[in-house]
């Protein structure tokens, strides 16, 4: 299969579709409900963001877009289901940067992020909030790092499983600071946040932490984005907290199996491009710490390629690998 020529066809179709009239005026697809695979359990920030988007997407296009949560093996199971799905536009895939991270750190991942799914559109970007249990005697990221150094092997952190974005972020933090932390895999980061709040886990990173922070159930130390989170304007970025060069910026993106009709991809891209400009959608995503992206249709393809290069470099420089 000629990947380059195939991608050119999709880009041409996207340009034609986006130059045409609005979503409501375009006939045809979808004629029945659309399945959207999310490779995470229900309740996490990616799942919640996906539901915000698919609800509005269904309203715009006149058919339900139904989330199917397919977690497991660090997002590998759900991704492989999407890659092998029928190429008719009625199975889509909505994920975050873990899609690009997993193949870098897991040799068993059988998909190529740049070839096996067609990027439809970037929906939003977001950083992670580093939170700890309030009983831990630390009030800043610097104090947390010092505490971990003084108590090697006693500090743990949780993620959504081996090879997930938070696992990568935690191991990267460990590598850069020289601290020792034990990784505890969960089915979702929302469960890890619950255990931090309950005193059963020391630290995790997630976007959907505001209710816990506001209630005083977790302590927010820093955010991994390149800029401060508007929800927590007094909380520093990791770089501001004394660790320049560390950042973990994820994204929410919609994909389709390779071979999906180009006009369907164009129609979906147009619809997503419209909904991320709507105030109601933007507010709901902002509540999750997400910044909606109203950029060009090919932005997601660039992000996947850029992330692959970044994470390969970091993995090589730090010797980071997952068992």
Image (cartoon, helix red, strand yellow):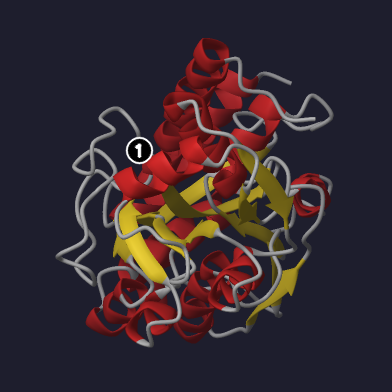
Secondary structure at numbered mark 1: loop
Residue drawn at (56%, 48%) of the image: 166
**Residue 220 point in image, percent of width and height:** 35, 65
Left/right placement of residue 11 relative to residue 140 reads: right
The residue closer to the viewer here, 89 or 251, is 251
Q: Of residues 57 and 195, which is closer to you in this image?
A: 195
**Is residue 100 something one can see in this rendering?**
yes
- Could you tell me residue 313's position as x and y percent? 49, 15
Q: Is residue 224 visible?
A: no
Quadrant the N terminus occupies = top right
The residue positioned 37% from the left and 47% from the top of the image is 297
Quadrant where the C terminus sits is: top right
Write down the residue under mark 1: 247
Q: Is residue 124 above or below residue 146?
A: below
Above/below status of 241 relative to 267? above
x, y percentage for residue 232?
22, 69
Q: Position of residue 182 (x, y in %)?
A: 67, 43
């Amino acid at each position: 299969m000629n990947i380059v020529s195939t991608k050119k066809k999709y880009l041409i179709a996207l340009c034609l579709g986006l130059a045409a009239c609005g979503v409501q005026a375009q006939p045809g697809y979808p004629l029945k409900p659309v399945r959207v695979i999310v490779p995470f359990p229900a309740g996490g920030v990616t799942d919640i963001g996906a539901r915000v988007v698919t609800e509005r997407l269904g309203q715009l296009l006149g058919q339900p877009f139904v989330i199917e949560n397919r977690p497991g093996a660090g997002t590998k199971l759900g991704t492989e289901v999407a890659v092998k799905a029928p190429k008719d536009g009625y199975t889509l895939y909505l994920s975050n940067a873990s899609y690009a991270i997993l193949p870098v750190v897991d040799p068993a991942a059988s998909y190529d992020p740049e070839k096996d799914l067609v990027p439809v559109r970037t929906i939003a970007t977001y950083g992670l909030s580093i939170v700890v249990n309030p009983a831990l005697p630390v009030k800043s990221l610097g104090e947390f790092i010092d505490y971990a150094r003084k108590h090697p092997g006693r500090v743990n952190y949780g993620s959504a499983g081996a090879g997930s974005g938070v696992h990568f972020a935690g191991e990267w933090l460990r590598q850069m600071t020289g601290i020792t932390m034990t990784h505890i895999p969960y089915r979702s980061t929302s469960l890890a946040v619950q255990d931090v709040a309950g005193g059963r886990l020391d630290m995790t990173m997630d976007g959907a932490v505001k209710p816990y922070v506001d209630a005083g159930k977790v302590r927010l130390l820093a955010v991994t984005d390149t800029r401060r989170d508007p929800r927590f304007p007094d909380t520093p970025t990791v770089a501001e907290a004394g660790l320049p060069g560390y950042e973990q910026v994820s994204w929410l993106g919609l994909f389709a199996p390779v071979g999906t009709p180009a006009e369907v991809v164009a129609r979906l891209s147009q619809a997503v491009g419209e909904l991320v400009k709507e105030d109601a959608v933007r507010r709901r995503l902002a509540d999750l710490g997400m910044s909606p992206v109203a950029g060009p249709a090919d932005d997601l393809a660039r992000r996947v390629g850029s992330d692959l290069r970044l994470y390969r470099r970091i993995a090589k420089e730090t010797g980071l690998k997952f068992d």
